[in-house]
Image (cartoon, rainbow, N blue to C red):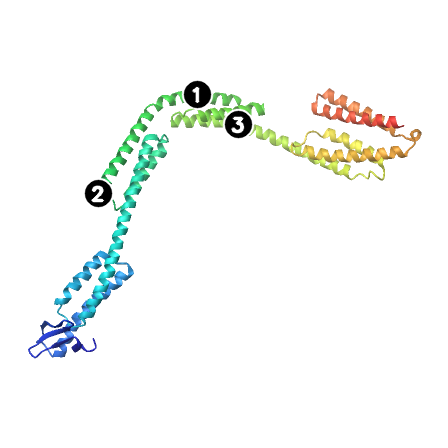
Amino acid sequence: MSDPANFGRIDSDGTVYVKTAAGERSVGSWQAGTPEEGLAHFVRRYLDLVVEVDLLEARLGSGAADASQTLSSIRRLRGGLDEAHVVGDLDGLAARLDKLATTAEERAGAARAEREAAKVEAVARKNALVEEAEKIAAEATGWKTAGDRLKEILDEWKTIRGVDKKTDSELWKRYAAARDGFARRRGAHFATLDQSRKQAQGRKEELVVEAESLAESSEWNVTADRLKQLMGEWKAAPRASKETEQRLWERFRAAQDAFFRRRSEVFSARDAELKVNLERKQALLAEAEALDIDADPKAAQARFREIQGQWHDVGRLPRDAGSGIDRRLRAVEDKVKTAMDAAWRRTAPADNPLLTQMRDQVAEAEQRLARAQAAGDAKRIKEAEKALESKRQFLRLAEGSS
């Protein structure tokens, strides 16, 4: 607008005209100053319209404005241009408004489509909530969980917008009916619960009495199995009232804890003893594996026999350690037997003192078996019988080859 005369003029009587493609039209009268001042005044009014259009264009472009409301404002401005008391490029401003109106119409159409889609989605969401509520009302038996879920459904329901009033009312009636139906079923359930709680109390008191009678038992395996069975029976039994259930449970649990604490103390002491036994056998095994069998088979056999005697006197080992360490000792025993057999074959029968030694070993094995039988130790008896049979077999072989 460097030259306002391009878009308007003031004639000699003060009438102000604006120039458009359709021709000139009167937009007012100016009597208060020079024609230049008058044109400037009407140009400023035009610029106010330009600012308003700029603002509508910017807000529509940024997405901050509602497209339908913006379209109404555009149409209002566009409709007023033909009578606007301004001087400026009204044709250019009209073209801008027409273009902006087209954009606003497209945006408004898209917004309407989005609202319709949102409405469909909102109806679908509320319908899904209603169907879930109806299923809970008909089938649920987890009363607290189901009741909490119905409350969550209501909270979610309140967040859903965009459903028409009629549809929303119909869906709400279904939800309310489902909620009321669930409440009636739950009430009927709890009406019969008191009787079952009394029966549960009697049954759980029996379980508590038995558990307390087992708390001081030393039959560890049998009692532990029975206490586990009692726990299963406790879980299977109906619940008593909350206060009674808690009181009986504390007694029941205390009896179990007392037994298992005593068992743990005994097993811990036993494990400590077995660990000491393992350490002793590991030391004997290390000594056996360090024997120089090839250099002096006879001396190695004598020391190995001593180690075997000490080995059998050590006692029990932890369950997961026994087989491995026994295999290693038998491997040493096999090496000793192999070396002694080779030495036997290299020595004349008349000069071989090994027969006497082997007979002594058989005698010692027989004595060890007798001691184990006198002690009544089944495990030691079995081991002694096995060792005796092995020594007799070697003696028979030696006597047969002499």
Disc 3 designates what residue?
A: 258
**Label 3 environment density (alpha carbons within 10 Å; few <14, some 14–19, many ≥20):** some
Q: Nearer the viewer, mark 2 or mark 1?
A: 2
In the rendered image, the quadrant that contains the C terminus is: top right
Q: Residue at x 29, y 61 (%)?
A: 62
On residue 203, the disc is 1
Tell whether 233 sits left or right of 363: left
Is residue 270 visible in the rendered image? The answer is: yes
Percent position (x, y) of residue 188? 31, 25
Dot 2 amino acid type: Lys
Dot 3 amino acid type: Ala
Q: Nearer the viewer, mark 2 or mark 3?
A: 2
Percent position (x, y) of residue 271? 63, 32
Percent position (x, y) of residue 93? 20, 68
Between 242 and 81, the one lying in front of the other is: 81
On residue 165, the disc is 2
Query: How far apart are the two marked residues, 2 and 3, measured between alpha carbons?
Result: 65 Å
Percent position (x, y) of residue 148? 34, 36
